Image (tube, rainbow, N blue to C red):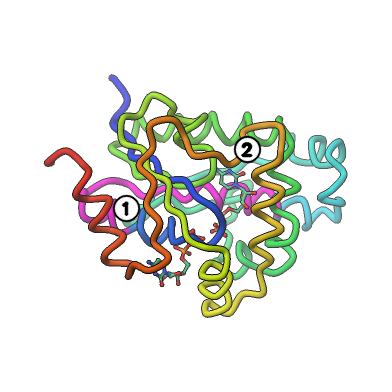
Amino acid sequence: MPDHPVITIDGPAASGKSSVARLVAQRRGAIYVNTGNMYRAMTWAVLDRQIDPADAEAVRQATAVVEIQSPVVAGQTVVQVNGIPLTDADLNSDPVNRAVSHVARVPEVRDRLVAAQRALAALGPLVMEGRDIGSVVFPNSPLKFYIDASEEVRSARRRAQGHADQVAERDRLDSTRKTSPLVIPQGAVVIDNSHLTLEQAVEQVLERLPSP
Ligand code: CDP
Ligand code: CDP
């Protein structure tokens, strides 16, 4: 059975990718996949085991026995660590925000999560968002988007959500890492939604998709 089509959405922290991806998936009857939550779940497991997230070798060893599952519930994947579901509060806590870009730099962590992400395309059409979806996970997808917004707007959006998240620092780490850095994927449509409503940003994606 050939894999189903994947709409890829990448972009920096708090640019609006998750909100846009979720709505595009709903309107196109596709499964929404938030890959950031998979890296966040690995990070939660690292912190739970009292491992220093900046110690790449310790992270590599500790995560080798951590299984991340992504069952589909109500049209979107939810993450589990060794079978235990995590809450949004677990995934978006301040310690996870601070540590996640360190854990996501470890090549073995990325290799395992990328393989799991590719396997999801067997389930049905996907809208998958993250940092390397159009560049590394599904580089051959013809439906690639890069959702951007200014740093000021992104920090303000995160604050409005009640999170004390250092988005600029995460962007710096994500853009400068050796393995799969955040880039605008080749062939991606760039949408700067600094001055767009969420609905307008969703429309800009939908109008570039082939009719269903
Ligand atoms: O929602 P937000 O943009 O704040 O972040 P996220 O998508 O939940 O991703 C959290 C972190 O996971 C990012 O800062 C990256 O370090 C990492 N990540 C990644 O390396 N590759 C992905 N495909 C998705 C996330
Ligand atoms: O997934 P990512 O971290 O890129 O961003 P998000 O969690 O989807 O969006 C961060 C916040 O910005 C959410 O509260 C969105 O509703 C809001 N947002 C907005 O106000 N206007 C937009 N054009 C896009 C997102």
| 199 in magenta | no
- Is residue 166 left or right of 198 when viewed as pictured? right
The residue under the point 19% across, 49% down is 207
Which element type, helix, strand or loop, lies under badge 2? Answer: loop
Disc 1: CA contacts within 10 A as few (<14), some (14-19) or many (>=20): some
Residue 198 placement: quadrant: bottom left
Which image quadrant: the N terminus?
Answer: top left
Q: What span is in magenta?
A: 23-43
Q: How many marks?
A: 2
Residue visible at 81% across and 42% down in the picture? 59
Location of residue 175 (image quadrant): top right
Q: Residues within 10 Å of mark 2 (few under 14, many from 20)?
A: some
Which image quarter holds the C terminus? Answer: top left
Q: Which residue is at the front of the view, 99 or 123?
A: 99
Res. 181 mark: 2
Judge whether 53 appears above or below 134 on screen: below
Residue 127, percent across and down? 35, 45
List the residue tagged with mark 1. 75
Q: Secondary structure at mark 1?
A: loop
Q: Please state which of the two labelled residues, at mark 1 or mark 2, is closer to the viewer.
A: 2
